[in-house]
Amino acid sequence: MSDGSAVREESTEPAVVPITGHSARPEIAARLLGETLRQARKERSLSLRDVAPVIRGSVSKVSRLERGESPPRERDIRDLVAFYQFSSDQAHEIEGLLQQAKNNAWWQKYGDVTPNWLRRLIGLEAGATRIASYENHVVPGLLQTRSYMRALVSNGLPGASSEEVERRVKLRLDRQRILWSPRRPSIVAMLEEAILLRPVGGPGVMCEQLDHLIELSQRDGINIRIIPFERSASVAPSYPITHLTFGDGGPSELVYIELIDSAMYLSRAGDVEQYRQVLLNLLAASQRMRDSRDLLVEARDRYAARAADSAL
């Protein structure tokens, strides 16, 4: 795929055709629409390559559409409806999903400062029931404070204007709204111990960030685990991994792997299982919840002492 995402042929297991008697959020509607199209293709024993000419695109374009990772175009969807010879009821259902998927999501207003691969992740997070992640360099984005975000963005984009920095920070803060939603996903965040020792923004910023993690770790549905140095060598990959679980009738699982300037989205059953096992191994190597919280408190106290010394 042109943006660095992986092109994968999905599992041939039969999918559930969604029922759209109610309004769905755009990102969920796009996934349900894609799953309906994928099932129709599978039922007709067609490959991605067979379908690509119908929408004047590539195999990767069809793959992205079926995974709900690309905005559906009306012409493409209607051409596929005709190609698959859907019944009038099925066509009506698909038209409803198409219109819901086209509704502007909140994060589209940040398109100028958000790469496509990150926009996809934000949309998928909003429809997830569980998000399990591993990070080796920084606090996971959903758990960052404003000051920590600002330090990361400023360090990563030294030539950016203050306005651009603030827009990127605001995007990241808005992304965290799912944590306060009544339908918020459960969160399992596994952090390398090195993250606690990396003074992003200085002692004051780190003290605030660690206080935030301590507070979050005491909330129901948020499980923050620290992976000690001595246990990580044999199980920890060199890149972040996020595993998303869904319950909306579309593909039930997806793995997101973040690279330097792109990302891979994997939905094939074998790939998902491989990375699920990696995350399970990381969880087994991590400290228990209470012990992880103790490590957060110890790190916070060290930074608080440094901040106090620097103020003298």
Image (spheres, grey):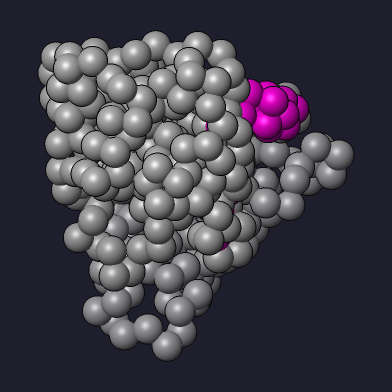
Task: Decide which of 72, 193 is in the foreground and name it.
Answer: 72
Task: Decide which of 307, 237 is in the foreground and name it.
Answer: 237
Instruction: Return the x and y of residue 166 as percentages of the image width and height.
Output: 27, 71
| Residue at x 36% of width, y 63% of height | 114
Task: Decide which of 238, 116 is in the foreground and name it.
Answer: 116
Q: Is residue 205 above or below residue 230?
A: below
| Residue at x 55% of width, y 65% of height | 261
Q: Is residue 45 visible?
A: yes
Determine whether, in the image, residue 73 is placed left or right of residue 44: left
| Residue at x 73% of width, y 52% of height | 238
Instruction: Return the x and y of residue 88 as percentages of the image width and height.
Output: 17, 17
Instruction: Return the x and y of residue 226 as percentages of the image width and height.
Output: 64, 38
User: Which corner quadrant holds the N terminus?
Assistant: bottom right
Determine whether, in the image, residue 150 is placed left or right of residue 19: right
Instruction: Return the x and y of residue 260 as percentages of the image width and height.
Output: 60, 64
Determine whether, in the image, residue 52 is placed left or right of residue 260: left
| Residue at x 13% of width, y 18% of height | 22
Q: Is residue 67 above or below residue 140?
A: above
Q: Quadrant of residue 16?
A: top left
- Residue 167 lies in magenta, yes or no? no
Residue occupying the far bottom of the picture:
159
Q: Is residue 25 visible?
A: no
Q: Which residues are magenta?
A: 262-281
Q: Quadrant of residue 256?
A: top right
- Residue 265 lies in magenta, yes or no? yes
